[in-house]
Amino acid sequence: MFGENEKYGWVTACNAEKNIMLGYLWETKEYPWINFWRSMDNGIPKAFGMEFGTTGLNEPFPVVAKKGKIFGQNIYDFIDAGEVISKSFTAFLAKIPADYKGVERIDVNNYRFVIKEKCRTSRDITYLMK
């Protein structure tokens, strides 16, 4: 997750039964928005989504274009004919203990990021980005 003035955004999902964490890390100048959604069937959750991107509203384009901005940020990107835009993100899988408390924050320094666990200081997970 990320605050309004953060350089990096991130999102993680943990499965304690499988001892695994899935995560994504990106620059907020490239992907300023994150949307969370869920699909229900008769009151039972069937799917949960974590989508980071350039669109800040889950609406048809005419509605998005009319709105324009939220919180001072454009809620869409426009790519003109023949234009090329490159963006990137980091995806990671991490092994976690069954009693993992969740992610407090992710610190990024150069090509290294450190996943800080909630309520702990001794079980950080460190990665080098390639």
Image (tube, helix red, strand yellow):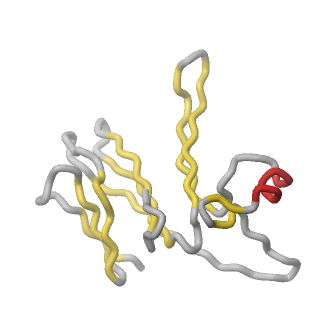
Depth order, front residue of 87/71: 71
Going by the image, does 40 lie left or right of 102?
Answer: right
Q: Position of residue 58 (x, y in %)?
A: 70, 47
Q: Is residue 109 above or below residue 44?
A: below
Image vertical order of residue 76 relative to residue 40, above or below: below
Residue at 70% of width from left, 79% of height from top?
85
Instruction: Indicate the position of residue 19 as horizontal and vertical percent values.
Output: 28, 44
Q: Position of residue 128 (x, y in %)?
A: 33, 76
Q: Looking at this view, name the residue that lies furthest to the front.
A: 72
Quadrant position of residue 124: bottom left
- Residue depicted at x 29% and y 39%: 16
Residue projecting furthest to the top:
42
Residue 94: which quarter of the image?
bottom left
In terms of depth relative to the viewer, which is nearer, 73 or 25? Answer: 73
Give above or below for 66 relative to 129: above
**Image quadrant occupied by the C terminus:** bottom left
Describe residue 88's horizontal placement relative to residue 65 as left or right.
Answer: left
Residue 30 versus residue 48 in the image, above or below: below
In-image side of 121 versus 25 (left or right): left
Given residues 97 and 105, the one toward you in this image is 105
